[in-house]
Amino acid sequence: MPVFKALTITERKQKTPLTLFDFEEPQLGEGEFLVENVAVAQNPVDIKQLDHDVRIPSIPWTNGGDIAGKVYKVGPGVAEEDIKVGDRVISFVSQKTARHGGYQTHSITDITRTVKLPDSYTFEEGSTIPLTFTTAGAGVMHGLKITLPSPGDVLPLKPRGEPLLVWGGSSSVGSYAIQLASLAGFEVIATASKAHHDYVKSLGAQHVFDYHDPNVIEQIRQVSGDKLSLVYDTISVNETAKQCIASITSPTGGLIAIIRPVVDPALSTPTIKIIPTGGLKAFEFPEIGAALFGLLQTLLNRKLLKPNPVKVVDGGLNGVNDGFDLGRKGKISGEKLVYRIADTKF
Ligand SMILES: NC(=O)c1ccc[n+]([C@@H]2O[C@H](COP(=O)([O-])OP(=O)(O)OC[C@H]3O[C@@H](n4cnc5c(N)ncnc54)[C@H](OP(=O)(O)O)[C@@H]3O)[C@@H](O)[C@H]2O)c1
């Protein structure tokens, strides 16, 4: 008999460790399928949801956005050419019910949020991709108004001779934003701690600067000539937004995509517009989601996407409480925390 267990939030702003609870095999709605998770990944939002009681509609609840596993059962209206039992998949789950969350043995999802994972990627690698790739892509398309390559294009596209700055290049969102922008032909400039410069260059950034250096803005402006007008601030606090504004060199101004609501919109200037965006734009604007997931499938099939460096946390789902603590202490840097379901003690 399969085990159906979920790491469960049982109190709002719960301070005690989350524990595992049984659930019954869920009913699937039209177009839905159930994935038997092999690996699930952690995102900063998971901790914010728990600690600040955000987007938890009811208790008990199971959160988490990133899953990788095998299709266990398909619901009504799922076409066999889209998905069948046994397919290896990764998905940015919707969290519309607890059973659509990530930190559990099985998660419900649908084809609009899922791609197939080729054998050339491990489940652990695959789990690092869906939520932050979608966020990176939505920021580039919705925030910076860039048309990304189509699945049939020769990649990378021809150089455009135009720079694009990714502030926070070693973050998970930043790593995918760099890859997407360089595939689209931009000359990517990025910021990261010195220890991550080689990694960020391996993703496609041509110039990487240490954001701790007091001269970082000057260095960015120097390599940009008067051409920098597009910036993705993947850290998105007031300080980084101000740094991004100061980096823009184009005399006509530009656009800065941000992904957190904490940035003061009044920082925009008459010519530099701060644009709030985020992963959910891919579902608010289905054409963006379809373009992104289509491109993602192509990149995976052609092994053109580098997943985040994986750090497997001991204990599977039992290790999530420790992983959340590492996130709270700001100790996650240049890697993604991943939990293997098989490591969980049930
Ligand atoms: N709105 C949305 O849809 C959405 C979706 C995903 C994420 N987010 C938010 O976006 C942020 C990034 O998420 P993530 O998953 O990419 O985070 P992450 O991978 O955990 O980010 C960690 C990285 O941030 C870098 N960093 C920290 N402060 C920085 C600064 N001042 N300048 C440049 N880099 C800095 C660190 O770089 P070094 O180690 O090199 O110093 C570290 O590698 C989070 O706040 C998250 O909640 C929003």
Image (cartoon, rainbow, N blue to C red):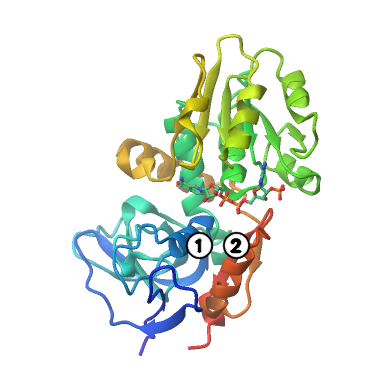
**Viewer-proximal residue, 262 or 153?**
262
Give the amino acid type for the residue marked by disc 1 in the picture.
Ile
Mark 2 lies on a secondary structure that is helix
Q: Which of marks 1 and 2 is nearer the N terminus?
A: 1
Can you give x and y, in whole percent of width and height, for residue 14 in the image? 45, 72
Disc 2: CA contacts within 10 A as few (<14), some (14-19) or many (>=20):
some
- Residue 252 seen from this side: yes
Against 71, is 137 above or below? above
Mark 1 lies on a secondary structure that is helix
**Viewer-proximal residue, 281 or 54?**
54
Give the amino acid type for the residue marked by disc 2 in the picture.
Arg
Disc 2 within 8 angstroms of ligand 1 (CB): no
Residue at (44%, 60%) from the top-left corner? 52
- Residue 151 seen from this side: no
Residue at (80%, 44%) from the top-left corner? 194
Q: Quadrant of residue 155?
A: top right
Can you give x and y, in whole percent of width and height, for residue 234 in the image? 57, 41
Can you give x and y, in whole percent of width and height, for residue 311 in the image? 66, 65
Q: In which quarter of the image is residue 185?
A: top right
**Viewer-proximal residue, 329 or 63?**
329
Disc 1: CA contacts within 10 A as few (<14), some (14-19) or many (>=20):
many
Question: Residue 249 vs residue 113: left or right?
Answer: right
Against 281, is 38 above or below? below
Location of mark 2 (residue): 328
Can you give x and y, in whole percent of width and height, for residue 176 in the image? 57, 44
Location of mark 1 (residue): 47
